[in-house]
Image (tube, helix red, strand yellow):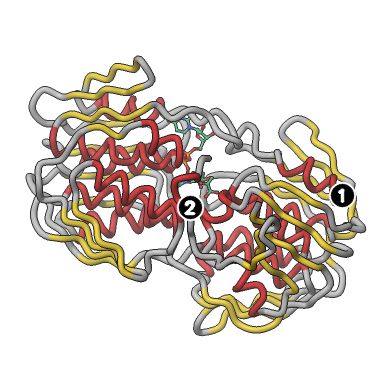
């Protein structure tokens, strides 16, 4: 079994470079299906198992996909297949993002219904409500969603009950080839939405207002392939910011965009962390003592749920009582039990977690319960007494490229091993087929 073994006690120092954003590249790759002419070339693509999964979905749908280093080329000009089977959706929920493009381009899409996952039930009713408002008939049965439109989708006014990232993206991608104008109200404002809108506009779409609460899309008749560079990963950046702070280190996180990280910067500064904007990124200097704070996850520009477990690791070392409230996902506290195994004084009360710090963390064998929990347990291991062994690394590989190597380069005492064989493994993604969220 593969494990990351970390021995706590080292201060991190140096420079780390962030990759292109997972949550930006997945919708952008799905959007390449909209181009009936020309090739799309995407740069700064991170080498993650999720990227390989979405590429496999596109190949299954009859697109030609070439992956070279950090570049992906997609030619989707051939007639596409219209079904995304469960084997892909099971591995990665973002596979449902092919639905909007297929419906827009070919008037029909059949996508396996994603189930719940370790962080909550995660329905997609808001995506489907948007497609229906644009004239599609949507049927759910036998584990599939079938959506079909007679002729072309029509522009519509759609109010989202919650600013869902995926629903905003799927509806945007459906609307770019619809007849007339679509207005999405109460939409998500995440930087990844802006990145997708920029890519769609470069393909010839007319999307305005991305990054605000209302997006207006005027449909066009055709889109063509284009080139695009993905934005830096704000969650990977935030994870390294926490790594610097928790160890009392001094790290330059290259590529971190301050405007994408304002809520995290504010909270870390409240805790006593020094954060300096430099030309190429953010320098993070951890204090001798961290202060307790309260944190509530919210849609952007609120505190990101994808940083909740890493922030929890940091608060375990803060002096005093902290509270974290999770409002985005109903069940994103599975890592709490694992932190307890490391001697954390922490309890769940409804949708909140109360932490009495600073905790005297002790190394233990712990299992990653989801992608960000994997990173958070490793962060806690950086300051725990003795050895922490983190298993279930398939989760980590969905969202972090060579995580242990990057930490080791900053001075962490960390390695990735296959315990049975006692062989140090390369951190690059190996067994994509076994990844299951
Ligand atoms: C690939 C990707 O970009 N994933 C991100 C995306 O996920 P994802 O797009 O799945 O997240 P959403 O914003 O859609 O979900 C947020 C909340 O809305 C609920 N909901 C969503 C859609 C819907 O139709 N009905 C509904 O009830 C979900 O169950 C959840 O409670 O945004 C999340 C919230 O920032 C992040 O944690 C994920 O990392
Ligand atoms: C929850 C996440 O991703 P996904 O929506 O792909 O599960 C994440 O990136 O933390």
Give the residue at x 73% y 74%: 412
Residue 133 seen in this snapshot:
yes
Residue 114's disc number: none
Pointer 1 residue: 344
Give the residue at x 89% y 47%: 345
Give the residue at x 60% y 63%: 238
The extreme front residue here reads 421
**Secondary structure at numbered mark 2:** loop
**Secondary structure at numbered mark 1:** loop
Within-10-Å neighbours for mark 1: few <14, some 14–19, many 20+: many
Observer-nearest of 334 and 403: 403
Q: CA distance from mark 2 to mark 1?
A: 33 Å
* Apparent side of residue 271 relative to residue 227 in the rendered image (left or right): right
Say which label, 2 or 1, has the lower sequence index: 1
Query: Compared with residue 394, is residue 109 higher up or lower down, i.e. above or below?
Result: above
* Apparent side of residue 54 relative to residue 119 in the rendered image (left or right): left
Give the residue at x 64% y 68%: 424
Pointer 2 residue: 431
Residue 304 seen in this snapshot:
no
């Amino acid at each position: 079994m593969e494990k990351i073994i970390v021995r706590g006690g080292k201060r991190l120092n140096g420079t780390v470079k962030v990759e292109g954003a997972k949550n930006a590249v997945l919708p952008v790759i799905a959007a390449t299906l909209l181009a009936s002419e020309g090739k799309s070339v995407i740069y700064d693509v991170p080498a993650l198992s999720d990227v390989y999964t979405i590429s496999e979905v596109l190949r299954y749908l009859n697109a030609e996909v070439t992956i070279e280093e950090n570049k992906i080329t997609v030619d989707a000009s051939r007639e596409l297949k219209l079904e995304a089977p469960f084997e892909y959706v099971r591995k990665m929920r973002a596979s449902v993002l092919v639905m909007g493009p297929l419906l827009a381009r070919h008037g029909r899409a059949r996508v396996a219904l994603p189930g719940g996952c370790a962080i909550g039930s995660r329905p997609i009713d808001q995506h489907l409500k948007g497609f229906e408002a644009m004239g599609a008939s949507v049927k759910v049965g036998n584990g599939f969603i079938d959506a079909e439109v007679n002729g072309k989708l029509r522009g519509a006014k759609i109010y989202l009950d919650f600013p869902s990232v995926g629903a905003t993206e799927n509806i945007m991608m459906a609307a770019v080839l619809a007849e007339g104008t679509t207005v999405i109200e109460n939409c998500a404002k995440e930087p990844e939405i802006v990145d997708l809108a920029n890519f769609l506009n470069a393909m010839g779409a007319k999307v305005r207002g991305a990054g605000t609460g209302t997006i207006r899309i005027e449909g066009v008749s055709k889109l063509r392939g284009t080139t695009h560079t993905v934005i830096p990963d704000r969650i990977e950046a935030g994870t390294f910011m926490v790594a610097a702070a928790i160890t009392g280190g001094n790290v330059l996180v290259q590529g971190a965009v301050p405007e994408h990280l304002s809520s995290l910067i504010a909270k870390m500064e409240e805790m006593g962390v020094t954060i300096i904007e430099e030309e190429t990124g953010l320098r993070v200097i951890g204090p001798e003592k961290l202060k307790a704070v309260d944190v509530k996850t919210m849609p952007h520009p609120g505190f990101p749920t994808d940083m909740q477990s890493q922030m929890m690791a940091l608060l375990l070392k803060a002096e005093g009582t902290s509270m974290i409230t999770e409002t985005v996902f109903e069940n994103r506290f599975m890592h709490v039990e694992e932190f307890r195994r490391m001697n954390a004084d922490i309890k769940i009360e409804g949708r909140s977690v109360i932490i009495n710090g600073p905790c005297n963390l002790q190394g233990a064998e712990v299992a990653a319960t989801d992608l960000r929990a994997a990173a958070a347990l490793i962060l806690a291991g950086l300051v725990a007494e003795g050895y922490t062994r983190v298993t279930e690394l398939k989760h980590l590989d969905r969202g972090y490229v060579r995580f242990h190597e990057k930490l080791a380069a900053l001075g962490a005492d960390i390695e990735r091993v296959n315990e049975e064989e006692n062989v140090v493994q390369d951190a690059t993604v190996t067994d994509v087929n076994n990844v299951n969220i």
